[in-house]
Image: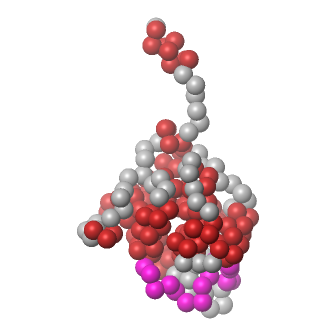
Amino acid sequence: MELEDEQEDEPSYDDPGQQVATAGQSFVLALADVLTHLSSLRPPPTGQRVTKFHSIRPPQLPIRDYLFRIAKYFQCSRECFVLCLVYIDRIVKLHPDFTICSLNIHRLLVTSVMLAVKFFDDVYYSNAYYAKVGGVRTREVNALESHFLQLIEWKLHVTPEEFDQYRSHVCTVGAAQPVPRLTADESLG
């Protein structure tokens, strides 16, 4: 009985981080594999709609290396990588003509992770810093952030159920693939 009284006195917070499993270090690697596969399904657009996220040619840095770079220098929680996937998927669901390909995935990633950090984490950096890490100009990352928010209709909140669904899906898909060994330079820690 005393235990029940103590629990009732505890303030209840609607914190998805407390209600779902966390995204471990291997999540970024699994996410990189999923996004690499996803972006390879569609060839770069020829007659397809080009967006602000499209580059002229595919960046030379593979998605895996780009995500590792973001993970290292953004110094954000791993949960932000789950949120970034939710946000990118929201764009695709809200705008069926929006396709993910090798020309837009890098800019989508830097923008979506940046927004996730600002929304979810307690500490974040300036857009100039995120632009430098992502290899784009500050003015461009500002425009991408604004456009991204419009595309997802400013809906940044992710329910615990939605978070867990995306995290579990990536972990399941990632576990099904052989995990390459990380070198010391690729360490996510």
In magenta segment, residue 117: no
In magenta segment, residue 59: yes
Q: Is residue 95 visible?
A: no
**Could you tell whether 65 is left or right of 151 in the image?**
left
Q: Main secondary structure of the magenta part?
A: loop
Where residue 134 appears, as percent x and y from the top left, is: 54, 73
Residue drawn at (58%, 25%), measured in percent from left and top?
11
Q: Nearer the viewer, residue 148 or 40?
A: 148
Position of the C terminus by quadrant: bottom left
Q: Nearer the viewer, residue 87 or 129?
A: 129
Above or below, comparing residue 55 to residue 96 in the picture:
below
Where residue 108 appears, as percent x and y from the top left, is: 58, 71
Colour mapping: secondary structure
The single residue placed furthest to the top in the displayed view is: 1
Residue drawn at (46%, 8%), measured in percent from left and top?
1
Where residue 88 appears, as percent x and y from the top left, is: 59, 65
Q: Is residue 187 visible?
A: yes
User: To which quarter of the image does residue 150 belong?
Assistant: bottom right
Where residue 13 appears, as percent x and y from the top left, is: 58, 33
Q: How many marks?
A: 0
Region of the chain picked out in magenta, as a range: 49-62
Residue drawn at (52%, 81%), measured in percent from left and top?
102
